[in-house]
Image (cartoon, helix red, strand yellow):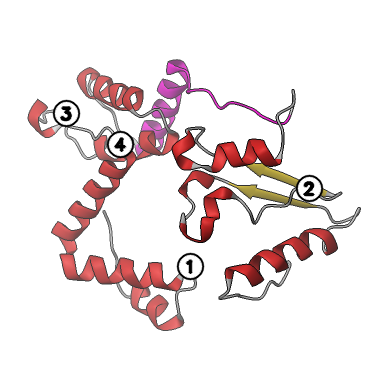
Amino acid sequence: MYHIPHFQDPKELVSDFQRCLQELPTQDKGLVILLDSMDQLDPSHQGRQLGWMPTSVPKHVKLIVSTLEEEKYECFPAIKFLYPPSNDNYIAIEKLPDADVRSIVDSWLKGKRRTLTAYQRDLLMKSFDQCPLPLNLKLSFDEACRWTSFATKDSTRLQTTIRASIDRLFFRLERKHGELFVSKTLGYITAGIGRINSMLCRFFSCKVVSA
């Protein structure tokens, strides 16, 4: 485990990141860095323009990144500029085939000991077609699992974007637990950046929060 100090100044963080890439990896202890969804980086400090990325990857370091390719997200053009495309260093992630989607849904249903009607399955597949991302499939599946077999068509609706699905989830949490509790809880988690203090951990250990 590498022990990296916490920096407030982005420039110091970039400098230390570059230093670590050069000094920490060895032939016996390589380093693999996975950076997923770089298009979701905070655009402040020109983060999506990737000036903080190394212009070349040092020996014993493997760098795997993913991003949407639209220019509006900035990342993909920047990556192509830093690392010119070759035959083997860029892989397009294609949409999941329908057969694979159905297999995944069947596996999830089996794990939950649930079933969906033919109409409900069709809605789930159409939702994925409109936003063919694995996260959207999971969010839509979780929503579909709340339906009963006799649910009306008006009550069996799925969102067409990840943002809308997440907003729907937050709305349901707020309706069940109260807007103040949910907003404050999520605010504490966001402010902690993953480092929830011991008091908050003790608080959550006494509360059972479900969607």
Q: Give the range drawn in magenta.
A: 89-112
**According to the image, label 3 marks what residue?**
149
Q: In front of the other: label 2 or label 4? A: 2
Disc 1 or 4, which lies upstream in sequence? 4
Residue 194: which numbered mark, if any?
1
For numbered disc 1, what is the local secondary structure? loop
Q: From where the camera sits, is residue 66 visible?
A: no
**Residue type for callout 2:** Val
Corner quadrant of residue 139: top left
Residue 128, given in percent of the width and then of the height, sits at 35, 27
Query: Of callouts 2 and 1, which one flags the residue occurring earlier in the amino acid sequence?
Result: 2
Q: Nearer the viewer, mark 4 or mark 3?
A: 4
Residue drawn at the location 49% of the way across and 52% of the way down: 41
Of discs 2 and 3, which sits in the foreground?
2
Principal secondary structure, stretch drawn in magenta: helix
Q: Which mark is residue 57?
A: 2
Classify mark 4: helix, strand or loop.
loop
